[in-house]
Image (cartoon, grey):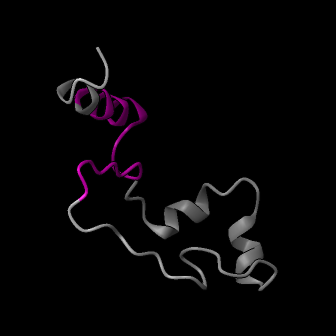
Amino acid sequence: MATPLEECEKRDTKGLYKKARKGEISYFTGVDDPYEAPNGPELAINSAKESVEKSAEKIMKYLKERKLLS
C-alpha cells in the first residue's frame, strides 16, 4: 500500500493517529516512527488515487500472472 499519511489519517475511524499525535501511542508508524517504503515493490496500490475496484483488479492480475491464483 502506498497511501499518503494524510489520507490514512482521514480514514482513521478508530482515532489511532489522533492518539499517536497526542503522545498516547508510541512508535506509531508515520507519526513518531518512520515509515520506510520498500525499494522496488512487486506491486504498489495507492488507494488515495485508485478505486477499490481498480486496486482489486491489479491484485488479481498480479496473483494470476504468478500462478498464485487460478
Q: Residue 45, percent across and down?
A: 34, 48
For the residue pair 59 and 54, the one nearer the viewer reads as: 59
Query: Which stretch is magenta?
Result: 41-61
- Left or right, 26 with respect to 39, comes to right
Give the farthest residue toward the right.
24
Above/below status of 38 relative to 47: below
Q: Position of residue 43 (x, y in %)?
A: 26, 47
Above or below — where is 49 with respect to 22?
A: above
Kindly identify the residue that appears in the image at 17 percent across and 27 percent down. Answer: 65
Relative placement, left or right, of 54 versus 65 is right
Q: Quadrant of residue 33?
A: bottom right
Q: Where is residue 54 in the image (x, y as percent from the top left)?
A: 31, 33
Specify the farthest residue to the front.
67
**Quadrant showing the C terminus:** top left
Nearest the viewer among 19 and 63 is 63
Q: Is residue 60 magenta?
A: yes
Which residue: 61% across, 54% down? 11
Residue 30 in the image, given as x and y percentages of width and height: 53, 76
As drawn, 33 above or below 10: below
Q: For this rendering, which residue is in front, 19 or 33? A: 33
Residue pictured at 72% horizontal, 77% vertical: 20
- Residue 17 is drawn in which quadrant? bottom right
The structure residue drawn at horizontal position 24% and vertical position 33%, both measured from the top left corner, is 62
Give the total of numbered labels: 0
Residue 13 vs 17, above or below: the answer is above
